[in-house]
Image: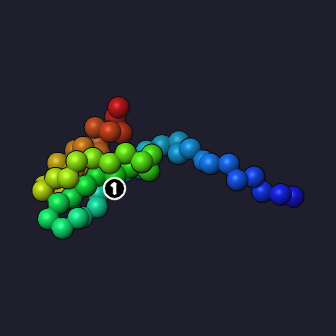
Amino acid sequence: MERQNTPTIPLEHRTSTVEQGRFCVARCSCGWRGPARRARSLARADAEKHTAA
């Protein structure tokens, strides 16, 4: 049997935060990226707003 290479679409958004120097950025499995923030709490809040939308 041959495998089909069809792209998969994430059913749920999986967010995480990534440190970039002095900044923290929220990212999502769908490709969304939040603004760079100095406070991790603000980056997490950006991610929560994205998943709620």
The quadrant of the rendering that contains the C terminus is top left
For mark 1, give the secondary structure: strand
The quadrant of the rendering that contains the N terminus is bottom right
In the rendered image, residue 6, in percent from the top left (x then y), is placed at 68, 48
x 18%, y 67%: residue: 21
User: Visible in this render: residue 41?
Assistant: no
* Residue corresponding to mark 1: 16
- Measured along the vertical axis of the image, is residue 45 above or below residue 22? above
Corner quadrant of residue 18? bottom left
Residue occupying the far top of the picture? 53
- Measured along the vertical axis of the image, is residue 23 above or below residue 52? below
In the rendered image, residue 36, in percent from the top left (x then y), is placed at 20, 53
In the rendered image, residue 23, in percent from the top left (x then y), is placed at 17, 60
In the rendered image, residue 10, in percent from the top left (x then y), is placed at 53, 45
x 14%, y 65%: residue: 22
x 18%, y 56%: residue: 40
Q: Which amino acid does label 1 sit on?
A: Ser
| Left or right: where 3 falls relative to 19 | right
x 16%, y 53%: residue: 37
| Left or right: where 44 falls relative to 8 | left
